[in-house]
Amino acid sequence: MRIYYENRVGRSVEDPLGFARLIYHRGTRTKAEFQALLGHTTRLLARRGDGRLLVDQRLMTPFTPDEQQFVIHEWLPLTILEGGYRCGAVVLAHDVFARLATATVVTAVRDLPMTYRYFDNEAEAITWLVTT
C-alpha cells in the first residue's frame, strides 16, 4: 500500500486492489488533525477517480459532536462533489461508542448520493468494495 497522507489521527492510502483506504488510529485528536486527514482523503479520492473508499474504524476513538457535524455538513457533501465519493465499505470500530457515533452520522446523511455498507470483517469489506 502506498501512503498518501498520515498524521496522528490516521492515514489515507492507495490500496493495490484498486481503491482508497482511510485508516483511523487510536487516541485523541485535534480538530485541525482530523480535518487535515479527511481533506487529504478527499484529494486522494479525486485523484483516483473511482469513488471507492474502505474506512477502517477498528481502532477509532468515537467522533465528538463537533466532528460528527463536520462530517455530516462539510466533509461528506464536499467529498461526494469534489472527490467523486460514491461507495464506502466501513470496517466497524471495536469501541461501542465509536459505533454509535458513526451510526449518528449515517442516519443524518442517508439521503446523500452514495452507498455505505458496514462490516465486522475486513476481507468481506474488501470483497464487497472491489465488486461494486
Image (spheres, grey):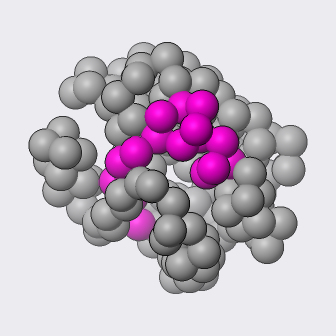
Residue appearing at x 54%, y 32% in the figure? 83
Q: In this view, does 121 lie to the left or right of 104?
A: left
> Can residue 89 be found in the magenta stretch?
yes
Residue appearing at x 39%, y 35% in the figure? 51
Q: Looking at the image, which is closer to me, 79 or 14?
A: 79
Quarter of the image where one finds residue 89 = bottom left
Q: Is residue 100 left or right of residue 89?
A: right
Q: In this view, does 115 lie to the left or right of 95?
A: left
Report if residue 65 is visible in the image: yes
Q: Quadrant of the N terminus?
A: top left
Q: Where is residue 48 in the image (x, y as percent from the top left)?
A: 42, 20
Is 79 located above or below residue 25 in the figure?
Answer: above
Quarter of the image where one finds residue 62 = bottom right
Residue appearing at x 67%, y 62% in the figure? 72
Is 9 located above or below residue 93 in the figure?
Answer: above
Report if residue 126 is visible in the image: no
> Can residue 56 be found in the magenta stretch?
no
Q: Looking at the image, which is closer to me, 91 or 131?
A: 131
Q: Position of residue 3 (x, y in %)?
A: 50, 21
Q: Where is residue 73 in the image (x, y as percent from the top left)?
A: 73, 59
Is 111 located above or below residue 47 in the figure?
Answer: below
Is 112 located above or below residue 14 in the figure?
Answer: below
The stretch of residues the image draws in magenta is 75-92
